[in-house]
Image: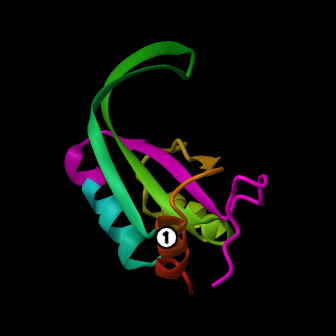
Amino acid sequence: MKSTYATESGPARAAVLTVLTTTDTAQKAEALASGAVAARVAACAQVVGPVTSVYRWEGAVETAQEWQVLFKTAAARYEELEAWLTEAHDYDTPEIIATPVVRGSAAYLEWVERETAP
């Protein structure tokens, strides 16, 4: 497999993304993590929490305890991961934020692409 990652000679296209979502229980976070990996729309997922979220919802400032789920996926699989999360998530408007991985271990990033190949 030809590497598509940044090297010392310069940047390349971002072939891998980290995608963040949050939910209100550890059990739901673990279910989202394992479901996305089982569906091969993410190579792996990490659950972190609890975290305190402060946000505006329906005109009021809210504070809630949430768990973050950080997915690693191939950029080519983002739309499928987003659709999967939108369907599986119980929030009306789930946080789904993707960040490109611009550098990293080539072996790890290639593993992410292999594990999310359709």
* Screen quadrant of the C terminus: bottom right
Q: Give the image location of residue 21, x and y in percent.
A: 46, 45
Q: Residue furthest top?
A: 61
- The answer to which of 41 and 107 lies nearer the viewer is 107
Relative image position of residue 109 (x, y in whole percent) = 53, 66
Q: Is residue 13 magenta?
A: yes
Along the viewing direction, whichever of 78 and 12 lies nearer the viewer: 12
Residue at 46% x, 66% y is 108
Residue 65 quadrant = top left
Q: Nearer the viewer, residue 37 or 110?
A: 110
Does the magenta segment cover residue 17?
A: yes
Which residues fall within the magenta stretch? 1-29
Which residue is situated farthest in the front direction here? 8
Q: Nearer the viewer, residue 55 or 75?
A: 75
Q: Residue furthest left?
A: 27
Relative to residue 35, is residue 11 drawn left or right?
Answer: right
For residue 51, above or below residue 3: above
Q: Amino acid at mark 1?
A: Ala
Q: Quadrant of residue 62?
A: top left
Give the percent coordinates (x, y) of residue 53.
39, 23
The percent coordinates of residue 28 (x first, y second) are 27, 52
Q: Residues within 10 Å of mark 1 (few under 14, many from 20)?
A: few
Q: According to the image, label 1 marks what residue? A: 107
User: In the rendered image, which quarter contains the N terminus?
Assistant: bottom right
Query: In the drawing, does residue 18 fall left or right of residue 8?
Result: left
Element type where label 1 sits in the image: helix
For residue 115, above or below residue 71? below
Q: Tell me the residue at 38%/71% (across/down).
A: 37
Residue pictured at 35% horizontal, 70% vertical: 35
Q: Is residue 68 left or right of residue 110?
A: left
Please tell me which residue is depicted at 79% across the width and 52% down the height of the picture: 10
